[in-house]
Structure formats: structure tokens, C-alpha cells
Image (tube, helix red, strand yellow):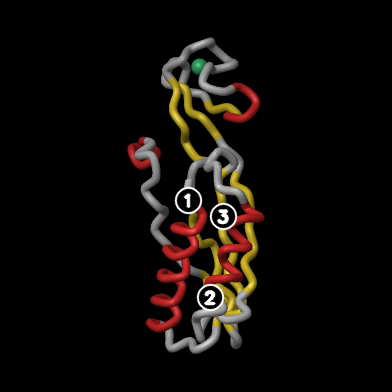
Amino acid sequence: MHELGIVFHIADSVEKIAEENGVSKVLGVTLEIGEVSTVMGDYLTDCWNWNAKKSEVLNGCELKIETVKAVTHCDGCGRRYETVAHGKICPHCGSENTWLLQGNEVSIKEICVEDAEMEVSYARDEQGGHPAEQRG
Ligand SMILES: [Zn+2]
């Protein structure tokens, strides 16, 4: 995972959202980072702070990171379990026919601007192509 690339991508998205909403200053951005995404939060924050200085909209913007618990779905028994605790083998039925439901994503949860907090619906990054979108 390349933290710098993620920072550029997030910064682009935030700037775009700010522009669309007529916002000239973004005070804070909250990210959701999956438990098994391999993104290093501290390094991501460093990259963010370095990059934010170059942007008028993002200068001084604080990056907050929330961790999303990794959950795996088992096709063998249809149940879900914690990925970090059990890995690829289902603790309920022993099946290896499992896939990551959530926990690999890096997404913007919230953007804080001067006047109000904007709830942002932001399409999750397609990373690793896990079949989480095939639900239902
Ligand atoms: Zn199972």
C-alpha cells in the first residue's frame, strides 16, 4: 500500500467536494481505514500534513483516522466472523471458502468545514476487488 498515493487521492476528492459545495477551507477530514488494509496510520498522517500545506483549501486540515473492523463472510455456513482473530478459515465450520466482507477499505467518512460538518457519501475505493458488492 502506498500511503502517499492514498493521500493524493483523498486530497483530490476532498478538494473536489469542497469546491462543489462552495467551501474555501476544510478544517478536518475523518478517514475510515480497514483493519487489514495495511495502511500505516501514522505515516498516512505525516504524508497528509506535508501535502495539506501545499493546498489553500486543505492547509492546516486535521486528519482523523478511524479503524474499521475486518469481517469475513463464510460461504460454507453463511456466517460471519472476525478476520484478524481467525484468518481465512471459518471458526464455525472450518471452511476455507471465505471472503473479506469489510476491512480492506480506505474511505472518507466525514469532512469538517468552517460552518458545519458535512456528511459525505463517498464511493468506497475499489481495492483488491473483494466481492463485497455482490451482497443480495
Ligand atoms: Zn463457515
Q: Residues within 10 Å of mark 3 (few under 14, many from 20)?
A: many
Quarter that holds the C terminus: top left
C-alpha span from label 3 to label 2: 15 Å
Q: Amino acid at mark 2?
A: Met
Does the numbered disc 3 mark a residue whose Cβ is under 8 Å from ligand 1?
A: no
Query: Residue at left 47%, top 51%?
Result: 2
Q: Residues within 10 Å of mark 2 (few under 14, many from 20)?
A: some
C-alpha span from label 1 to label 2: 27 Å
Query: Disc 3 on helix, strand or loop?
Result: strand
Res. 136 visible in picture: no
Q: Residues within 10 Å of mark 1 (few under 14, many from 20)?
A: few
Q: Which mark is residue 69?
A: none
* Residue behind mark 1: 2
Q: Amino acid at mark 1?
A: His
Q: Quadrant of residue 38?
A: top right
Of tags 3 and 2, which is closer to the observer?
Answer: 3
Query: Disc 1 on helix, strand or loop?
Result: loop
In this rendering, the answer to whether 104 lies above or below 110 is: above
* Residue behind mark 3: 32
Residue 48, how many percent across, how many down? 57, 66
Closer to the N terminus: mark 3 or mark 1?
A: 1
Query: Closest to the observer: 46 or 63?
Result: 46
Q: Which mark is residue 118?
A: 2
Residue 99, how many percent across, how many down? 44, 28
Residue 115, how many percent across, how many down? 59, 87
Q: Are marks 3 and 2 in contact (CB under 8 Å)?
A: no
Q: Amino acid at mark 3?
A: Glu
In this rendering, the answer to whether 47 lies above or below 42 is: below
In this rendering, the answer to whether 113 lies above or below 12 is: below
Query: Residue at left 49%, top 56%?
Result: 107
Residue 130, how many percent across, how many down? 38, 36
